[in-house]
Image (tube, rainbow, N blue to C red):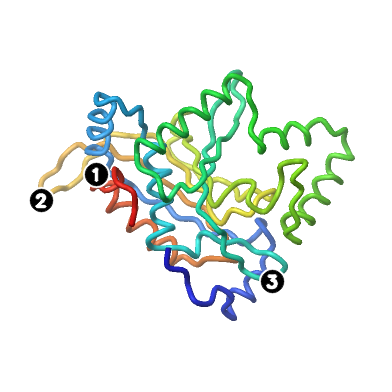
Amino acid sequence: MDLPENLNTNWRKVASTIYSKPTDSRIYGTVDLDVTDLEKFITKKRKEGTKTTITYILTLILGRAIRQQVPELNTYVKRGKIKQRKQVDATVSVLLPGGQMGSVKVENADKLTIAEMSNKIGQQIAQSRKGNENDTMQSKTFLSSIPWPFRNWFFKLYRVVTIHWGIALPGLGLDANSFGSYVVSNIGSVGLDTGYASLLPSSNISFVMVLGSIIKKPVIINDKIEIRRIMAISATLDHRVVDGSHGGRMFRLIKHLIKNPEILETPPK
């Protein structure tokens, strides 16, 4: 991964100072993706034995986008400076029994293939639904067990220590990389067409990607109107570490890889 020579430009230093996370340091963007051919590709892969989904493939695409186009998205603020993460990790939101939300974390998401990503997420989701909690879920369970108002005080202390000061709390499974580099959430699976997620105040992620419902829409292709299957994806980005231009570069590569998913079947060089 080619990293920028200087992450801490004058503007980045100012942005990390004047914005509070995530109160007012957010950039929003939405793109409509034609996933008609991607769905056919997924059907083919499933017949071949790879149990993949659009969520899994988009999670992989985002990891590749960070690796190839926007390494600035793999950063976080620590003590007023922009820090580069050592690897690209993804967190995927999952729906657990009883309607509760959980999450699974995939390390080195940029280095995987479609089959590897699908297997890793699938296995972790199966474990979560059996009640086996990962570090993030365990920390949430611990926090929820603290009586109010001590819960609020503990969270404020935790945020200062881990997020602002960058000190890890391994006993609680909490550190600057607890949620990885980015979060993917498929709200289309619960019936929502589109939406924007918050930048979790308990995390150091630089962006959250939300996948909406897939809807049939008329699209002009070669001067002819065709009915295609369209999905809106929306990003919330931390303006302290990136600008709108970074989101534009990310979306351009997403569109390219959506049209050419076979690229994702081999590891990146």
x then y, percent, for residue 178: 64, 46
Which badge, 3 or 2, is on the more N-terminal residue?
Answer: 3
Residue 82, numbered circle: none
Pointer 2: residues within 10 angstroms few (<14), some, or many (20+)? few
Q: Residue at position x 28%, y 32% from top? A: 42
Q: Name the amino acid type tagged 1.
A: Glu
Q: Where the C terminus falls, by quadrant?
A: bottom left
Foreground residue among 186 and 182: 182
In space, the residues marked 3 and 2 are separated at their CA atoms by 49 Å
Vertical comparison of 83 with 225: above or below: below
**Residue beneath label 2, please?**
223
Residue mark closest to the camera, 1 vs 2: 1
- Quick one: which residue is furthest to the left in this view? 223
Q: So how many labels did they put on this image?
A: 3
Callout 1 touching callout 2 (CB < 8 Å): no
x then y, percent, for residue 104: 55, 35
Dot 3 lies on which element?
helix
In space, the residues marked 3 and 1 are separated at their CA atoms by 42 Å
Q: Name the amino acid type tagged 3.
A: Thr
Q: Residue at position x 22%, y 40% from top? A: 218
Residue mark closest to the camera, 3 vs 2: 3
**150 sits left or right of 10 in the view:** right
Pointer 3: residues within 10 angstroms few (<14), some, or many (20+)? some
Residue 262, numbered circle: 1
**Residue beneath label 3, please?**
17
Q: Where the N terminus falls, by quadrant?
A: bottom left
**9 sits left or right of 265 in the view:** right
x then y, percent, for residue 171: 77, 42
